[in-house]
Amino acid sequence: MELQERPRANDIGLPDASRHIIRDMILLALDATESPNLPEANRIEARAALAEALDTMEGRA
């Protein structure tokens, strides 16, 4: 099985300013998952998806 490289934000033509805004939005959303009213399963799933998005933005995925 061959691994496919995921596109990174800078590979799809986003300017640096846009990447920083998206990164900040992801970080704010991660903070929002700390709400005590959010069901645990939803919190875990949301944090995993946001962490993966952040890794992709930063080229670590």
Image (cartoon, rainbow, N blue to C red):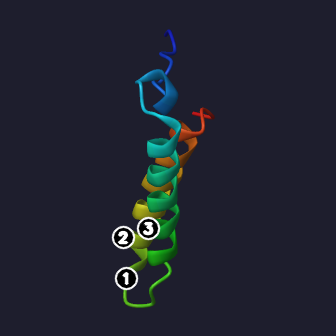
Discs 1, 2 touching: Cβ within 8 Å: yes
Front: mark 3 or 1: 3
Determine whether 36 is above or below 14 in the image: below
Q: Which mark is residue 38?
A: 1
Determine whether 37 is above or below 12 in the image: below
Label 1 – label 2 distance at C-alpha: 7 Å
Q: Residue at x 53, y 38 (%)?
A: 16
Lower position in the chain sequence, tag 3 or tag 2: 3
Label 3 – label 1 distance at C-alpha: 13 Å
Q: Which residue is mark 3?
A: 29
Q: Which mark is residue 42?
A: 2
Q: Amino acid at mark 3?
A: Ala
Q: Amino acid at mark 2?
A: Asn
Which residue is most to the right? 60
Q: Quadrant of residue 60?
A: top right
Asked which secondary structure carries label 3, the reply is helix
Residue 30 locus on image (x, y percent): 50, 67
Lower position in the chain sequence, tag 3 or tag 1: 3
Asked which secondary structure carries label 2, the reply is helix
Residue 15 locus on image (x, y percent): 46, 34
Q: Amino acid at mark 1?
A: Leu
Asked which secondary structure carries label 1, the reply is loop
10 Å crowding of disc 2: few (<14), some (14-19), many (20+): few
How many discs mark residues in the rendered view? 3
Determine whether 7 is above or below 38 in the image: above
